Amino acid sequence: MVFIMRKYLELFFLWSSLLVAVNAACSSNQECILINNCPHLYNLLLQDKLSEQDVQILQKSQCGFDKKANKPTVCCQRKPDAVPADTSLLPGTDVCGQDPSKRIVGGQLTELRQFPWLVLLEYDKPTGRGFHCGGSLINKNYVLTAAHCIVNIPRSWRLVSVRLGEHQLDADPDCEDGDRPGFEDCADSPIDIPVSEVTLHQQYARREIAKPNDIALVRLSTPVTYSKSISPICLPTKPEFLNNRFNGAVMTVAGWGRTENSTQSNTKLKLDVPITQDAECRQIYERNGATLTDKQICAGGRKGQDSCSGDSGGPLMYLERQPDYIWYLFGIVSFGPTRCGTAAFPGIYTFVPKYLSWIVENMKS
């Protein structure tokens, strides 16, 4: 133990004197983590004698400094993620990710029935019932949402039901102009299904600023019948998705702007948001006391936008255009500087590809 501490301290002081030369950016196949969590570099550090080349490798690998742990962080090769062995409870792409509003009118997607997997979580409160979070339907029995929508709520609140097939909260039915003059296209009325069970991620840290493992499964009391207004989104189980950070890609958030402590819109909103580079996002949040991990992804950062158009617990979605138009769930709205976005401050999303095994292991038929 004394030897390990001596070697660590030697390198700590070496790094501390060279902080001006720290390389804060890791490549897309690396993650910025504590050195003792990176076996290759940690074993190098523990050698009896460090060569000049070893020292250079360790110096160049540093990507930051974790003030909370009081240790340097290094760029470490990511462990490749694997597709869960059993995905039989998940719908195939012939069912999931289908957006019936994808016909084009005047160059814009029509809104009615768009994103039919979007749901609202309804809570019983002392003042009556209300919607304060969102989620995504992933099969006939389950909704995926954020853990903070379950536990970071007032003690007097209780999650009671899920609303599916909604578009405009103060209208029933929801209608838009039809294809012919004088005709309206109306969606089916939304439905409310009671919640039978909630499964939180066992390592969700409710009191930490960064909200690690902010994910939960909500089981419905009765299976959903799919329709044009209600259908599931696909989970990103394709191998090419699993180790891709999608830096620079554009994804979409959607919802009614509902959060655990506020409300925003009666009509479903949507917004395209660019994925932010991991290193850039981590630097921004570290200055504010939040240490992010590779199980989170950042998007947005435009003044007055960001997750304004989404719900806490709602989806960050990616549209794969080839060979078919299929929507995939890549993120869950977790937190940000404000719910309505701040310039140069991206929103933080739980990165769904990192939780595929947890999701399928906690689903029942």
Image (spheres, rainbow, N blue to C red):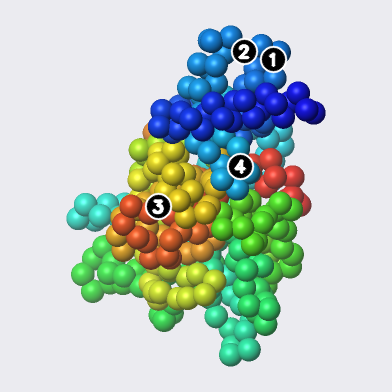
Asked if the residue under mark 4 is in contact with the one under mark 2, i.e. CB atoms within 8 Å, the reply is: no
Q: Residue at x 59, y 88 (%)?
A: 128
Asked if the residue under mark 3 is in contact with the one under mark 1, i.e. CB atoms within 8 Å, the reply is: no
Task: Compare residues 121 and 23 and report the one nearer the observer.
Answer: 23
User: Could one spot residue 164 in this view of the protein?
Assistant: yes
Residue holding disc 3: 346
Judging from the image, what secondary structure is the residue with disc 2 in?
Answer: loop
Which disc, if any, is residue 47? 1
Q: Position of residue 217 (x, y in %)?
A: 67, 57
Determine the CA span between mark 2 and mark 3: 40 Å
Q: Nearer the viewer, mark 1 or mark 3?
A: 1
Determine the CA span between mark 4 and mark 1: 22 Å
Q: Residue at x 64, y 62 (%)?
A: 207
Determine the CA span between mark 3 and mark 4: 26 Å
Residue holding disc 2: 50
Task: Compare residues 176 and 39 and report the one nearer the observer.
Answer: 39
Circle nearer the N terminus (1, 3): 1
Q: Nearer the viewer, mark 2 or mark 3?
A: 2
Circle nearer the N terminus (2, 3): 2
User: Could one spot residue 80 in this view of the protein?
Assistant: no
Circle nearer the N terminus (4, 1): 1
Judging from the image, what secondary structure is the residue with disc 1 in?
Answer: loop
Q: Is residue 213 left or right of residue 336?
A: right
Circle nearer the N terminus (3, 4): 4
Residue holding disc 4: 70
Circle nearer the N terminus (2, 4): 2
